[in-house]
Image (cartoon, grey):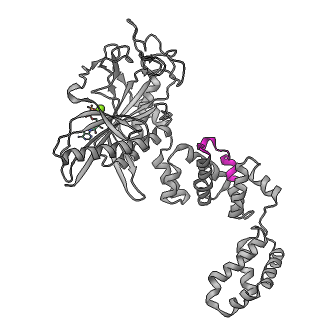
Amino acid sequence: MSYESVIGLEIHVQLATKSKLFSGAATRYGADPNIQACIVDLGMPGVLPVINEDAIKMAIKFGLAINASITSLSVFARKNYFYPDLPKGYQISQLDLPIVASGTIDIRLDESEVKTIRITRAHLEEDAGKSVHEGFGENTGIDLNRAGTPLIEIVSEPDIRSAKEAAAYMKKIHSLVRYLEISDGNMQEGSFRCDANVSIREKGSTELGTRTEIKNINSFRFVEMAIDHEIERQIDLIESGQRITQETRLYDSTKDETRSMRTKEEANDYRYFPDPDLLPVSVSDDLINEIRQTMPELPDAKRQRFIDDLGLSEYDSEVLTTSRELANYYEETLTVAGNAKLTANWVMGELSAALNKDGLEITDSTVNAQMLGQLVKRIDDNTISGKIAKQVFETMWAGEGTADEIIEAKGLQQVTDTGAIEKLVDEVISANPKQVEQYQNSPEDRKGKLIGFFVGQVMKASQGKANPQQVNSLLKEKLQ
Ligand code: ADP
Ligand code: MG
């Protein structure tokens, strides 16, 4: 039998507010345990939550970016469960009336194929604290710094059909929240993580199969591995005549396997009810319009502009807009260099390779956009050849000055003086009488190999500095 996999993702994004969702405590990562938990986060009797306006605005911003509808009166609810890192005994979340409902996002599967994934909802909720197992012997420590940190949970429809699509979707949401500057998206620190719901069904069927949910995946690579693994496990079960149990599973990346955490029977009954301490959140059209004014250019629009206005290829535009930082770097380089395609080649080529090699982010690049722009400009205005430019780039990367300084200090300017080039051409011709004879007697060899040989010799004699077009035409003229 042939199967189709069906996947829906729930992504948790930590919002980049300075303080928590319902208290004034700081949200900064990495502080000493429990110094950023105030009486509200600790769930002391008698305290009252106060909503953080910035968190509301960030959620709306996300909603606008996915063309969703913004709920004019959204409601906070208590989700009740018992866990040591949850001091109040409930998490404040949203159930029936989430702030953002029914949006869409496009993911690119390859150069020509785009797929739309529907987003059911995005709701606001507070994060829980953390259990700390190291350094407490038989006991467990509780760090409540994260308790009350604002999150949006983004829930997709089960529109995703493969592990690859799931990773592409997760990357697209990640890029989007960073473009919007509503989250730092730091996956190591847990600011961006997802649960993957996976089921399989007979190809062609329209019914949904029984699903399992894999919890807390915090990398693009793991989401792909975990889902692929889970699809295989489910197919094996069905093929051997067994049934899938609806359950929550945990992905172990070191063993590349998923393990059962709890089945549906053991699932919590969260006894949701509207939080009586919080009023419904009223969002006016004025507020929505005000936020609309602050929207940056989004990745899809930017990609289209790169194609239409700069004449870049679909592929180049896609790569250069994957992150806001890369797109900014490219545009700043272009302002100095003034040649869109050549600049794209350098950013995606030499620069990316150098960043990869040194494990650097674009924002920490040794060569900044101004410096790269100046180098590309010198290729574009024929001061140096592309080949020499690579040498200049390496020197620049090593911190030995700007492109112009290096070109000047090492005397790398391209030789365009016809007299000087002519001299080298004459020398090469007289040093290679056999090849000259061959060139003159067999016209079919001229275009390809032989002319290449002569150009190579002259370029070598000039240490790569002669202008190749001039070398080429002078050689042809003299060899006739
Ligand atoms: P819950 O609240 O129990 O987590 P939801 O109905 O809200 O369940 O669904 C959560 C996620 O699971 C959504 O992303 C949804 O698209 C996905 N989902 C629901 N049913 C299936 C299924 N049969 N197979 C795969 N994904 C599913
Ligand atoms: Mg769920």
Name which residue lies at 36% across and 45% down: 166
Which corner quadrant of the image does residue 218 belong to? top left
Is residue 364 highlighted in magenta? yes
Q: Name the spot of residue 395 as percent of width and height, x first.
A: 73, 52
Q: Can the viewer see residue 288 in this picture?
A: no
Is residue 259 highlighted in magenta? no
Q: Of 91 and 55, which appears nearest the observer?
A: 91
The quarter of the picture showing ligand 2: top left
Outermost residue to the bottom: 441
Name which residue lies at 73% across and 88% down: 434
Outermost residue to the top: 46
- Residue 452 lies, with reference to residue 380, above or below; the image says below
Q: Name the spot of residue 62 as percent of width and height, x first.
A: 42, 36
- Residue 469 lies, with reference to residue 296, above or below; the image says below
Quadrant of the image containing the N terminus: bottom left
Q: Name the spot of residue 255 as percent of width and height, x first.
A: 38, 39
Residue segment shown in magenta: 358-373
Quadrant of the image containing the C terminus: bottom right
Outermost residue to the left: 241
Outermost residue to the front: 137
Task: Report the side of 90 relative to 379 (left or right).
Answer: left
Name which residue lies at 78% across and 63% down: 413
